[in-house]
Image (spheres, helix red, strand yellow):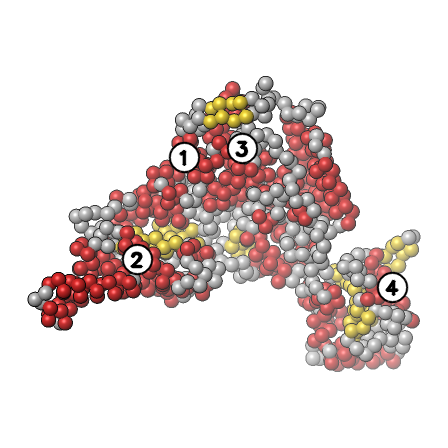
Amino acid sequence: MSSLVPELLDRHRMLTLADANEAETRLKLIDRIIFEVLGWGHDDASVEERVSEDGNTTFSDYVLRTGFSSLVIEAKRSGRSDLVVADKRKALLNRKLVSGDTGDAIIQARDYGRKLAIPFAVVTNGDQWVIFPATRTDEVPFEKSSAIVFPDIQSVLERDFSDFYDLLSREAVIGGSLETELLGRIEDQTDGRRLNQYFTTGFSKLSRNSIFHLIENEISTAFSEDIISSDPDLFAKAYVETPERLRYDKRIGMHLSKRQNVAPKAPHKAMSPQGRRAISGAIERAADSVRPLALLVLGQVGAGKTTFITHIKTVRERDRFEPRADRPYPHWIYVDCRKLGQTESPSDFIASVMFEHLTNDEFLSSYERCVKFAYKKEIEAMQRGPLSLLAFDENEQKRQIAEFLTEDYEAKKPYLERVFTYAAKNSAVFLVIDNVDQFDDPKRQEIIFGDAIAVAQRLGLCLVLAMRDATYVENRAKPIFDAFDFDPVQVEAPDVKAVLARRFAVAKELLRDKPSEFTAENGARMHLDDTSMLIDLISSSVLDSTVGSAISVLSTGDIRLCLRMTREFLRNGYTATGRAVDIFQRTGKYRLPAHEAMRAIMLGSQPVYSEEFSPVANPFDAKLDLSKTQMLRLFVLSAIVRKCSSRKVSSISGEEIRSALLEMGYSPDITLKILQGMCAARYIFTTAHGKPSFEANYLPSRLGGHALRVLMTEFVFLENVIMDTFIDDDDTWSDLKAITSEIYSERAPTKRIIKRIERVERFYEYLTQLYSGLREEASRRGLSAEWQADPFKEGKSVLASNIEKVRRSVSRNYDSTGKPRGIRK
């Protein structure tokens, strides 16, 4: 650059002296500043682009385009004396600036921008540079906007070069420099163009007399996470030891790659018979030989780490931890960090849990069995020393000893350390630390781990640390993890349908022989001698249909989420009605409508879809408040799924994603936010469980594959995400808002479905057009094939088929008057 500046300054001087024309000025000066100084590529630029309106055709000098931003440059010949600008950095686009030939050039560039839908414009003769907004969507008029002015070539290349480069370079423009400097913000989605901000109640008013209230308590119990601590026998029946074994999803044609093992050595598999035997053997050896054991329990979010730990204590090894009157026995002290306050000392919290266990335990709280031996040395020393003077008074000696012990007892920590140190020498004491992941602050996590390890080392306790794989990845390099030689245990997510089957079985047992009554849709009173038959109706419908598959896909191995989604679906969806019970009693078969299940799962407890409250993210909105980035979630997901759909490729690097989007004109900052949002949405994962970064490798989740190849053509999915998708186009927004109003006002199901179909088709058409810009940009820049695919074009026929199924379903379920068919009188 140092050698280029004198050359360009000299070139400008020569062009001015020669009174060069516009073409020569562009070729010898402006071109070089654009491409050599500002770093724009020739793939970014088009020259002499046709601008047509009202039968008139002109040609713009330059248009610089990336996927994120664009600007038009109007060039004039060098040395043109009447290109007059103010000698200050910013100037209003008022009459003073927009007048004479300078004003004509500004208006010409502005009009080119408006006709080509380009937001920013530049006027230059190579010497002076005027940069300003050509089109605005924030209702600020043109004459009240400001231009940024570089008054001469010395300002551009010497005095103010940093400002010039930071405003107009390719790197700066894709980072939002023009939006920030000229509009005051980078976000352009500033108004409330989301349907859920205008329509806040569900359009479908269910009047089907759902009878969920008859089974609500039992379902809540059976599908609650708290079942692991409420009843050991129920918990044993609900526990599943079969892992999810699906490695290839035929419906989406995608291999499901496993993420990397992060343990320091080969882990025991908690869900395998061999792994279970190894873990039980380790616990047995620790209990019998009183040799401290350190277990590191790892697993993904919701995989069941807490469930596994509790199963060890309350079911698999229950007899081992039963209190004994004849001898010491092992202890299991569970520390749930969900109960740890944000500012509470971890060491104090761990001590309080241990002290509570001590006071409630038959052995540890007994003076004769434990305490006097824990304090044996101190008591004997007191008796040899100061208490020897009271040797004649045994009762006074006991009183003095009691006061000494009471003082430690009230201080808690000294007392529990003495007692547990003694107990750990006679039988294993397991200190179990769980749910540290509730704290996002790595420093807070490190303190908890450090305090737990210190306690275990000091008292000779066995230590069990449970954490997410990602938490371990963040902390494994810290010295605290060198304190113990941990035996890792990997907890894999169990098979979702097996989990649901067990939970339904528990609910059925709780309801067995319980009578109930309810009023059917036709007003008739229906009596059930055994309400548990409702569980048969629901479970067969969920487990043997697309409903169970949907829950399995959408939960992505998160069993906690799976249980919550099922509860929400049964509570708010089409659980069972008089009509359903009638059909099931007559035929022994009934299928809950899959579309109602999907709707209930997506909505959760909300009346209309909002990504914030839904377990299913919107792939059609990146949530960055930037229209140019709106479809990047789907664009990146499409590339990742396609590249990783074969056995040959299991992941794609963050650097490859960064490079592709940078070539298209998206800054690394935007790309990283997209990756972070997609990981949070569970559409993709990092292979090594770390945080999203360009150094990480990514693989698609099963949910990500279904979002791309199934969900985006499902009628119910589309009409839900419509509600929380920003609609930038004026005509589309007007149409969708009007159609939605008609849907809400229409009461006849057959007429309403026509409007619902019309809305979905209009929405899909809009998304197709929105996505085409990304696909065309990828094609124009020659990106690899996975970046050039068009999922909307590929899914169009599938959507049409799904819409036809909706039409047939409505005709089958409602007569011409809109009344439901098939209810017996």
Q: In this image, 19 relative to 775: left or right? A: right
State how far apart marks 2 and 4 are (Cα).
80 Å
Which residue lies under the disc numbered 1? 506
The tag earlier along the polypeptide, 1 or 3, is: 1
Up/down of 173 relative to 706, above or below:
below
- Mark 1 in CB contact with mark 3 (< 8 angstroms): no
The numbered dot on residue 355 is 2
The tag earlier along the polypeptide, 1 or 4, is: 4
State how far apart marks 4 and 3 are (Cα).
64 Å
The tag earlier along the polypeptide, 2 or 4, is: 4
Up/down of 80 relative to 526, above or below:
below
State how far apart marks 3 and 2 are (Cα).
46 Å
| Residue 59, picture quadrant | bottom right
- Mark 3 in CB contact with mark 2 (< 8 angstroms): no
Outermost residue to the left? 392
Please tell me whether mark 4 or mark 3 is closer to you in this view: 3
Q: In this image, 378 relative to 32: left or right? A: left
Q: Local crowd at mark 2 within 10 Å, few (<14), some, or many (≥20)?
A: many
Which residue lies under the disc numbered 3? 575
State how far apart marks 1 and 3 are (Cα).
18 Å
Amino acid bearing label 2: Phe
The tag earlier along the polypeptide, 4 or 3, is: 4
Q: Position of residue 30 (x, y in %)?
A: 79, 71
Is residue 408 or residue 128 the one in the foreground?
408
User: Which image quadrant: the C terminus?
Assistant: top right
State the residue at coordinates (32%, 42%): 315
The numbered dot on residue 108 is 4
Q: Secondary structure at mark 3?
A: loop
Q: Secondary structure at mark 2?
A: helix
Q: Secondary structure at mark 1?
A: helix
State how far apart marks 1 and 4 are (Cα).
75 Å
State the residue at coordinates (39%, 31%): 509
